[in-house]
Image (cartoon, rainbow, N blue to C red):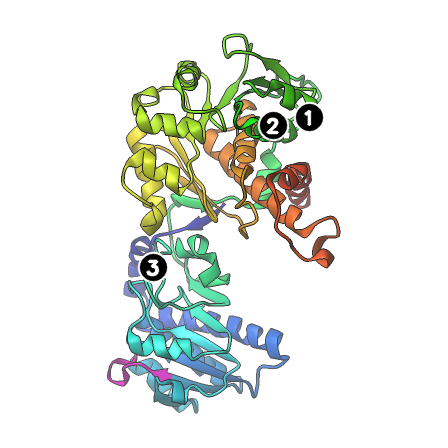
Amino acid sequence: MRSYYPCEQVRAAEAPLLAALPEGTLMRRASYGLARVVADELHTRTGAVAGRKVSLLVGSGDNGGDALWAGTFLRRRGVAVTALLLDAERAHPAGLAALRAAGGRTAPATPEHLGDPDLVLDGIVGISGRGPLRPAAAALVDAITAPIVAIDTPSGVDPDTGEVEGPAVNAVLTVTFGARKPVHILAPARCGRVELIDIGLDLPPADLVSAEPAELGAVWPVPGADDDKYSQGVVGIVAGSAHYPGAGVLCTGAAVAATSGMVRYVGSAAAEVLARYPEVVAAPTFDAAGRAQAWVVGPGGGTDEQAEDTLRDVLATDLPVLVDADGLTLLARNPSLVRGRSAPTLLTPHAGEFARLTGSGNPQSDRVAAARALAADWQVHVLLKGHATLIARPDGHTFVNDAGGSWASTAGAGDLLSGLVGALMSSGMPIDLAAAAGARAHALAANLAARGEDGERAGTAPVSASAISEQLRAAVRILRAYASES
């Protein structure tokens, strides 16, 4: 698992090292690693290190000191380094003296002094900084045309939430120290590629993690020698209606693609589902559906009295249940349907559905805290959809999956995700792991669909849910291939 730590926890882990090591040792350790990564980036982009130009955006905190020390190490490798000081009186004294002694230049932090660097290092604010860039820094950043390397976190982006309230840095590369921070997964477009420099921190297991593709591929259920269709998991799908039969087709189809078990369908779209997936076992009502190991309820199912009665019946079972779409609308009207349920329950809202469930508006300002709060309050698992999909357990532990793009932002894609995750739940996987695996395969399938049959040579194009559905098995194969290679 890849771990992400809030800044307060990182600072607490740094404190014993700062107390035990000679003054400045930890900063120089971090800056040396930063300079090495920047030198590699220079070489990759320009073919050389010596003779290239780097500008440092130097704030008044320790991040400014990191920038100055990194500039010192780069200067010793023949790089022309200019430090643009946002507050010369408060610049890190030891770092500033070291840079000047190595032959580095200093200048006021104005666009006129920016020059034409090959790379720019963002050392404006560190992990203690909050809020947007101040006007002078914003004007300087706005004038930059060279690639920016952020030190620890991009300035102007909240390091714990990824929120951006105004002017902020867009980096192509972020070099972070000791531990990855939440911003690196919650705002990947701002951070670019993230490189971690180990500085010797002793950290506990993280509460915010992302699973590597090989890990998810290794746990994806496939038939063993003694398996049959029942032992691999039977998932029930309650989805679709006269108005939205496609939701039933998409949700059921994703469940069929996810595992080799069995899929039962309940709903008015049985004819459409069976025409596409004849292996599905359909029933007219929930009571007639037969045995299942998990249920998915809600996609396109309507919000009338009959739909609410069916949702109540599904939630009255002692089986894992995933509730999505119209089912979430019903829960927003009547939370008692799910509150106090002892069997595992997964709610899968997008931002609008989340706002209806909680009555607290859009969760964008702190999505992790919002998802955890709902999970704890209702004692359910919550999958909050987005570019970075969050899966929060009632105890606060949270998986995060970076989609790597927004290709799944299309009508019907959520129905696919529900069927995919529901099938994994029926196999016996823990709810949060099933949601994390399903979210990763779903995002990968969307990216594959956008590339088309010719892969990268074909470029990318907008996709539909049907196109994503056709790539689900390919996505699973890729995840399992990662596992076999690791």
Q: Which residue is mark 1?
A: 276
Q: Nearer the viewer, residue 81 or 103?
A: 81
Q: Position of residue 68 (x, y in %)?
A: 38, 80
Could you tell me which secondary element the residue under label 1 belongs to?
A: helix
Three-letter amino acid code of the residue under disc 2 = Val
Query: Residue at the spot x=50%, y=63% of the render?
Result: 192
* Magenta region: 84-92
According to the picture, the residue beneath numbered tag 3 turns out to be 158
Residue 56 is left or right of residue 470, and the answer is left
Q: Give how far apart the Cα atoms at labels 1 and 2 are.
A: 8 Å
Q: Is residue 85 magenta?
A: yes
- Dot 2 or dot 3, earlier in sequence: 3
Residue 407 lies, in percent from the top left, at: 57, 49
Q: Nearest the camera: 362 or 94? A: 362
Find residue 354 and report its image quarter.
top left
Q: Alpha-carbon distance for marks 3 and 1?
A: 47 Å
- 42 vs 198, nearest the viewer: 42
Q: Is residue 224 visible?
A: no
Read off the residue under disc 2.
249
Q: Residue at x 46, y 65 (%)?
A: 174
Q: CA distance from mark 2 to mark 3?
A: 41 Å
Closer to the chain start, of discs 1 and 2, is 2
**Circle 3 residues within 10 Å: few <14, some 14–19, many ≥20:** many
Q: Are marks 1 and 2 in contact (CB under 8 Å)?
A: yes
Q: Residue at x 35, y 85 (%)?
A: 110
